[in-house]
Amino acid sequence: MMSSFLFRAMDARAGIFLAIMAAVIVLVPAGNLLMPEGSTFHVPNYAVTLMGKYLTYALLALAVDLVWGYCGILSLGHAAFFALGGYAMGMYLMRQIGTRGVYGDPILPDFMVFLNWGELPWYWYGFDMFWFAALMVLLVPGVLAFVFGWFAFRSRVTGVYLSIITQALTYALLLAFFRNDMGFGGNNGLTDFKDILGFDIQADTTRAGLFAASGLALVVCFLICRAITRSKLGKVLVAVRDAESRTRFLGYRVEHYKLFVWTLSAMMAGIAGALYVPQVGIINPGEFAPANSIEVVIWVAVGGRGTLVGAVLGAVLVNFAKTWFTAALPDIWLFALGGLFVVVTLFLPKGIVGTLSQGWTALRQRKVSEDFEAGSDQPPSQAPQSPASPANVSPKKSASTVPADADPQPAE
Amino acid sequence: MSLMRSFLLLFSLAASLLAAPALAQSDPETLRPLINELANGKYSETEKQIGALVATGDPQVAPALEALSDGDLYVRKADGEVFIIKKAGKAYALIDPLTLETAGEAAKREMDKIKVNNKLRRVIRSALGSLTLMAPDPTVRMAAAEAVFKAKDPDSIEALDAAIAAEADDGVRKKMEEARAAAVLNSDMDEAAKLQAVSTLGTMGNRDALSLLIAVQSSSEGALRDAATSEITKIEKSIAAWDAAQNIWYGLSLGSVLLLAAIGLAITFGVMGVINMAHGEMVMIGAYVTFVVQEFIRSSAPGLFEYSLFIALPLAFLTSGLVGVAIERGVIRWLYGRPLETLLATWGISLVLQQAVRSIFGPTNREVGNPDWMSGAFEIGQMTITYNRMWIIVFAMLVFAGLMLVLKKTPFGLYTRAVTQNRRMAASMGIRTPWIDAFTFGLGSGIAGIAGVALSQIDNVSPNLGQGYIIDSFMVVVFGGVGNLWGTLVGAMTLGVVNKFLEPYAGAVLGKIFVLVFIILFIQKRPRGLFALKGRAVEA
């Protein structure tokens, strides 16, 4: 059962992806820890942290791709789940500081001492234990997404309306976390972490470990997403994306399917946030900003929505470009990012991976048909049997029917 | 001291009573010796001389006394004449203390300052109050009554009585009676008089009266205390009503700001179904047009500054409108029917526009001035109404009405509605739908631009101006119901008022969070907004 579940998750594209990920997970920490400095294979410390950050972003993009690419739910608030997971981890890290803080209070974090809080608020209890914090990383975003989704999907809020209220959700959380009274450090957020699970958070080995953990989390989540999208459940999700009413009339409880992937996606985003925080060393309300959530969507769009691998690729590429641009040409970055939004939506609606695989399929098709025309040694019955043959019509059809396809979407 | 002062005041009162109607304007020359006397002697003598001046009961002496209290009254050493001086460079400009005409200049060393101390200042203040109560100018009398009300000096009761008897203006008399009531409560008069005073204050019904009554309540007992308590509850009720009115006003003001920001969006999103995330940047462009217009006026035609906003309005409309048309032709028309992609593309455009403005004008806030007719405030009852807020409400309503007219009464509006309702049929009737799309989008963007002109008056003009409004605007349109301008109006006003009513209880930030959560829940209940379109249009 389990092996067949995993087997379904595999194909050539996923195989390449997993191979690359395995190489990255092994080679980057090894290059950092084992290679001597000055060697061409040495990976500098900042690069490990930076790439670790990209991996957590990639996980966030994967979560967005699951709901947007496969279920048609465009979330403009996924950064909220990411930040909530980050805050849960940040609270654990704050409690680990103990007496090493500026005020040396064994229980209260520094900002609470500073604000003259007498005792720890109830919602901070338990965060001194890692297992509890790890549970909360999953539960807090999960429960919020469940409640939000329960209301939204049951009353059939879809399309643009849903996007706007997810944006309102993250905006409301942004405002809330800015308040000092909330007990999450207000404007400054949580920072100045010392160690995680007893390891010094600044040490090279810890950073390499966090990098590997991020990579593993990405691989595991990728496999889960892959398995889901290739199962029967995944087929229903795509049906919901393409024609929600029709799927409902066929007897599927659309809102249950949506609620399931929505909650799962939020939990993945929470994990990404939890891995992000110890690597960058700070979490503050700025992470809730609606602009962040929209940026995640463009990562997915660049890589290719509905491809999973594309989301990862898009997140890494766009963030690499961001790092490079903001250092080299800071004024140009917003032009580049803005232009990317426009260009991708206009000219690359399928994203990089989608376009490439479409081109690949078309190429193979042509080859098959050329062979078929040239050589009469192929039995005529072969062509309809070839696995690519259903796609025979698809490239042209999808190109010509984009406007017609899109028609049912807005009113949904 | 206080004995003497009461004596002086009594004396002045007697004098004023005797001469009340006639003394309004006596000959300045009879007063001059008295004023010149001020220069002689020590503080105690000056005090007597002030008393003598007050005793004339002539308002003409008031400027001299004011100048004395401010330290601007000087004596000329040569002839002992007293003048009010104004510092003019190294010399003093002399002003005649009675006629208030300029009387030449004098070098500093020719003049001696008439010294004054705090005790004298107090004497002058209370004397001035009762003195100017009889002034011919009602605004001066009003100010005097207010001064006495604040001083609560029991010694001025008699002066007030006389003034009330002679007063012709109802408003001023009322103020004087209130001042008298305040003074009576502060005196040791009998309970009947105080009860009377309490009820006078009760009819006054504002916060000043409330604080006085609370003082009475805590310091008295018996009937007086009961009376004060009942008046306090009455006043608190009336204050609560005024507070509510003020909150509604603030709410309407916020609502009209939201309306201005959202109304352009109501066209592009509501009527055309295009999610324009760059809408906030259209508002920003309008604000920057105002800035550019004002800069131009400052440098080349300063006289036109008062009209700068009227000049900026059409320019902002055109600029934002053209940018809007360009966006529609360049990007959005390829994305009709794909709302989520439109959202992403327009978000990208908004980033580009923001960065473009940041590169041209710099990242900091730009100064946009208020013309005179936009600054200042006036009062209705116990509400303060600032002119800029008032004009913005008026302006929002005008824009709304104008837009309704355009959409309902012009051929262009007819075409727009036709295309909105059924694109294909409109096209078969000969309407050039692509043009209508472009112009409708331009109209929505242009409206955002003129909203930017208005918002530049109350908000910081910075590249981030638009971002602050985009979420609120979407909330308004979605709450009001897409495709319905009336819904946008009601939505904006409701959200504005609700926000302002929550603020006193929850604070500004928490209030806003509540409103957001409320909208999220509301959309669950009515996914198509307050005024949803019904019938076939829903599926369009």
Image (tube, coloured by chain):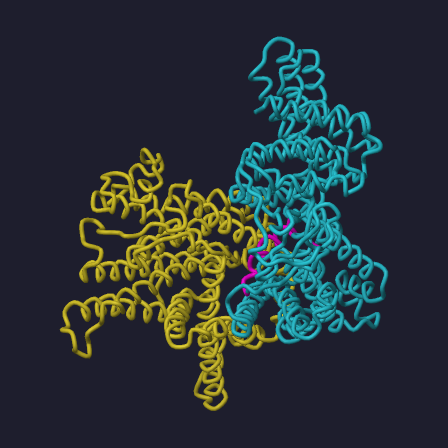
Chain colours: A yellow, B cyan
Q: Residue at x 73, y 68 (%)?
A: B303
Please name whichever residue, A200 or B103, is drawn nearer the observer in this view of the structure.
B103
Kindly tell me whether residue A365 is visible in this rendering: yes
- Residue nearest the viewer, comparing A177 with B292: B292
- In x, y percent, where is residue A396? 57, 77
Which portion, as a residue range, is magenta? B463-484
Which residue occupies 64% across, 21% down? B232
Residue A244 visible in image = no
Secondary structure mainly formed by the magenta segment = helix
Where residue B524 sits, quadrant-wise, is top right
A115 displayed left or right of B356: left
Q: Nearer the viewer, residue B10 or A142?
A: B10
Q: In the rendered image of this protein, does residue B233 appear above or below residue A199?
A: above
Is B454 located above or below residue A132 in the figure? below
Residue A132 part of the magenta-drawn span? no
Quarter of the view holding residue A17: bottom left
Question: Which residue is depicted at the point 25% across and 66% down?
Answer: A25
